[in-house]
Amino acid sequence: MAPLRRNILQHTCGIVSLCFAVSLLAGCSRTSPSLGFIASSLALEQTETGQAFENSIGLIFVPIPSGEFQMGTSSETKVKWSNIKDESPLHRVRISTPFFMSVSEVTQKQYTMVMDEKPWLDEPLTKKIPSTPATYVSLRKATEFCKRLSKKEDRVYRLPTEAEWEYACRSGTLTAFHFGNKPFKLGEYAWYFNNAYKANEQYPHPWGLKKPNHWMLYDMHGNVCEWCSDKYDLYPTTLIKKVTIDPKGPEKGRLHVWRGGGFSSNSQDVRSATRHIAGGSHYRPEYLAGFRVVCEMKEQNIKSSD
């Protein structure tokens, strides 16, 4: 994105986010960005790939172009994050096919429309707000949500792979966060420990109140942790010398991957490369368990690059 366009977009998003915050306090029912706003703000590589759309339950999707990126964190990085072992080695990954990704985590309203249940009810660290991410959602339930939505709309909805998630979060960047390496701007893009849990706002927040990344994806850092389809394992060291195409994680394993961190996570735990292990006895914060979804592109939705 050209510097001028990026500055205009960030300024616009800042104004829009302020307006949403004011409308939320005033009790307005519409607190999230519209399809029109999102569609008009897509990056050039996205408009060359496909068009944003809103489905029958109000989930907005944007096109994510195919491409290559560096996944993980280099062991040579100057900033010594404590969880870097899970993220090394840094390796090349190719996403061979474009896809659509929801701009937000699946909300309470959307989850209920499909699953006819509210697992967050009467649970701690939640607030009943329709545009807030659904939480206390197990991997099994998130997968079932995708199956039911696919049947309802005759399209393929699924959880993102871990590689697709990080690729979409980075949106062309190589930095620790999708906006840069320094966490001092994190509060502009994320609900995390400093501006949520520590501030006695110990619950997920409605989507759209923070700035999106370059590909108009909101809350990729913080708010709630997001299920990926991959089972968890350390990255093999053999990945260093090759480009891996569309990885889907190990075939066997009991643990799964969460990405993005949540409203109680510190800055190092919401980075683009941060991996969380879901299902382990040492890490089971179900109050953070949410998800966003991928919609596979039909052939007619993919624009030619010629």
Image: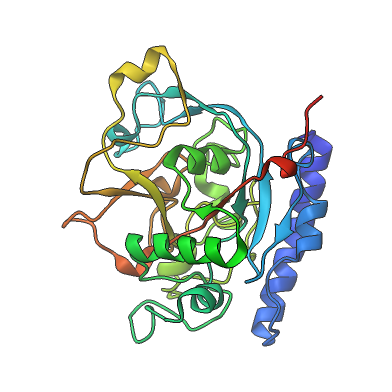
Whether residue 81 appears in this view of the structure is: yes
Tell me the residue at 29%/35% (across/down): 250
Q: Which residue is most to the top?
A: 241
Question: Which image quarter holds the C terminus?
Answer: top right
Look at 54% across and 48% down and name the residue there: 184
Q: Nearer the viewer, residue 293 or 236?
A: 293
- Quarter that holds the N terminus: top right
The quadrant holding residue 6 is top right
Position of 264 with respect to 67 (left or right) is left
> For the point 57% across and 71% down, which residue is it?
206
Q: In the image, is 94 to the left or to the right of 188?
A: left
Residue 249 x/y as whole percent: 35, 36
Q: Quadrant of residue 27?
A: bottom right
**Is the image coloured rainbow, by chain, by secondary structure, or in one colour?**
rainbow
Find residue 46 and report its horizontal and vertical position in percent.
73, 40
Residue 188, placed above or below residue 203: above
- Residue 193 in view, yes or no: no
* Whole-percent x, y for residue 173 in the image: 59, 33
The total number of labels drawn is 0
**Which residue occupies the extreme left position in the image?**
281
User: Residue at horizontal 62%, vertical 71%?
Assistant: 57
Against 121, residue 1 (above or below) is: above
Image check: 224 left or right of 26?
A: left
Q: Please state the horizontal and vertical placement of residue 44, each as a whole percent of the image.
A: 79, 37
